[in-house]
Image: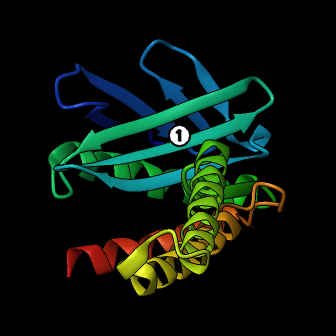
Amino acid sequence: MTPYAYTFKSKPEGAEVSWQLTGKTLQLENGEQVDLSTVVGGTFSDMPSGAHWVSCLVLEHSGGKTKIACRDMRTGASRAQYMSLVVSLLGDLAVVSPNAAFRSGGGRFATYALLLIGVVLFGLGIYAMGGAILGQFGDATQFGLSMGAMALIFGIFLGWSGSPWSKPTTRSPQDLLNWLRTWLRRAEA
């Protein structure tokens, strides 16, 4: 099988890193290899961060975890090479490890952060509404009630959105690949 090489920078100021993909083997520049048939799952995230996009694919396999990351402009050359690797990799995984389960998003830290922010907003909402009802805001009672209600509702929404107690949604490599292709087409439009 012909190996396909993908070379990109993990960060704009970093050195280029090369990855080779040959059927069911991913080889890192340092010689480390990952047998794709041993991949059981992982995570994928692709989020804007200032002027850059931060993308990360983590493969969980029998040898541990392999992280493939890139931080580049949305239309940057490194990001294009990175996304080509991810699309090819997911295509190969769909064949050799179709039952792997991938989670999308920022991971468990993001869910706990949303929950914490939601709880704080909920508390502020209760405080503002209680203060308004007890007349502590004087002429600003109406403002206290409305802002308190908004903070309360938004806090519940954020806390529920985080919901670290719920099982994360997973996708098969083929489902993640289909979603990613749609996402990339929309981003290019």
**What residue is rendered at 16% in x and 47% in y?**
77
Q: Residues within 10 Å of mark 1 (few under 14, many from 20)?
A: some
Quadrant of residue 99 in the image? bottom right
Q: Which residue is mark 1?
A: 22
In the image, is residue 48 above or below residue 1? below
Question: In the rendered image, is residue 5 in sight?
Answer: no
Quadrant of residue 75 in the image? bottom left
- 7 or 59: which is nearer to us? 59
Residue 67 point in image, percent of width and height: 54, 32
- 158 or 167: which is nearer to us? 158
Left or right of residue 135: residue 108: right
Looking at the picture, which amino acid does disc 1 mark? Thr
The C terminus is located in which quarter? bottom left
**What residue is rendered at 57% in x and 69% in y?**
131
Residue 119 point in image, percent of width and height: 66, 57
Left or right of residue 64: residue 132: left
